[in-house]
Image: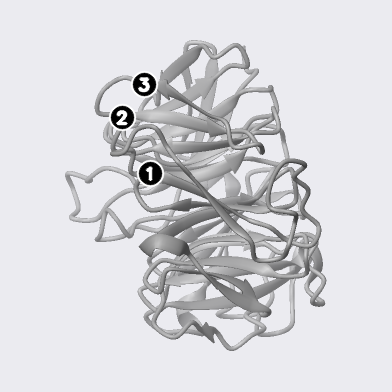
Amino acid sequence: MNDGPGLSRERDPEFMVGGTHWNDKYRFTSWPAAASQDWFGAIGGITAGPDKAVWFAEKNGNVGRIAMNGGFTEFPVSNVYPGKAPDLVAFAKDIQQGYGDTVLFISLWGADRMANMKIDGATVGPANPFMLASVALGGEAIGGMAAGPDGNIWISETRSLKIWAYPDKEYKVPNGGEPMGIVRGPDNAMWFVDGYAKIGRIATPESTWSDCCGGAKGTIQEFPVPTSTAGIGSIAVGPDGALWFTEVQANKIGTITTAGVIREFGLSSNTCPQGIAGGPDGAVWFTEPCANRIGRIAPDGSISEIPIPNSPGGHPIAITTGPDGNLWFTEAGQLDPQSPKLNPKVERLEIEAR
């Protein structure tokens, strides 16, 4: 997958795979990503693409793509936007503004800007893959991005305390909230993380909710999380049709139904759960960067915490279900004793390997 000099770099799959290793019944396979000097800026979000690949952000200036056959390609955003670091990635599924499933939205860390990249199956086009001049957000910091049911890409603006339905309208989050992660809920409303201990819901014309809000576009309802020091990180839709979120500071996982009923699950101490995703096995999966583990909540509520083998100090960050039905996650990496740089990776966890 290469559309011309300077636009992408393909790596040999056999050379790039950092190793396959087992942990009890789970098999992990890793792909080293480009190194970074900054732990917090080593690697960012990850998402499944419509092209049978996973896409992820490398904060050193690249967007990466791993095909299900192991092929690894990097697209240097820094060639188009010098000094801008990709942070979050989201495909514009169901977007009606002429994007379709073949456009990847990219937030640019430290630049408060958003860019687009068009893909077409296994090819990139046009000649310059970043088809929009990046969209300035007026000083805001992007905390989350998600496709909505109404023809917009929804963006949480952390500094300005707003949710932006791009390119339609901005909605002010009430009571001085600080919106972060955002996702399209099973009720076609947009659900978001608000500050340390609230979950927010914004109605869209397509949303449904029998006992609340009337569905008027832009109506915001917020739900306090029982643990006031939760420090909520990410939010995702679970296989059970509820919303699930990570409580980074409280070492808990929370869930909220579309009717607003919240439940919390305690984890081991010092886990700092961060990324979360619904799995194809009916469970909810999440990352524990402080403990270097991947967690799993089964439909019956039982919790498993799975150490990542052969990767001491790896710090898993974002997680998603890939096109192959396995879990894929980004890993910030640990210090290399031979180098001042980190060793970030993308890892695949095969959930039915044994």
Q: Could you say which disc has been placed on residue 79 in the image?
A: none
Amino acid type at circle 1 is Ala
| Residue 176: % across, % down | 37, 64
Q: Residues within 10 Å of mark 2 (few under 14, many from 20)?
A: many
Q: Could you say which disc has been placed on residue 271 in the image?
A: 2
Residue 112 lies in quadrant:
bottom left
Q: Residues within 10 Å of mark 1 (few under 14, many from 20)?
A: some
Mark 1 falls on what kind of element?
Answer: loop
| Residue 10: % across, % down | 59, 62
Amino acid type at circle 3 is Leu
Q: Quadrant of the C terminus?
A: top right
Q: Earlier in the sequence, mark 1 or mark 3?
A: 1
Residue matched to label 3: 267
The one nearer the camera, 284 or 166, is: 166
- Tell me: residue 120, above or below residue 261: below
The residue most toward the bottom is 133
Q: Earlier in the sequence, mark 2 or mark 1?
A: 1
Left or right of residue 248: residue 258? right
- Distance between the alpha carbons at the discs numbered 2 and 1: 18 Å
Q: Could you say which disc has been placed on residue 197 in the image?
A: 1
| Residue 290: % across, % down | 28, 34
Amino acid type at circle 2 is Thr
Q: Residues within 10 Å of mark 3 (few under 14, many from 20)?
A: some
- Distance between the alpha carbons at the discs numbered 1 and 3: 17 Å
Q: Quadrant of the N terminus?
A: bottom right
Asked if marks 2 and 3 touch (Cβ < 8 Å), the reply is yes
Look at discs 2 and 1 and give the one toward the viewer. Answer: 1
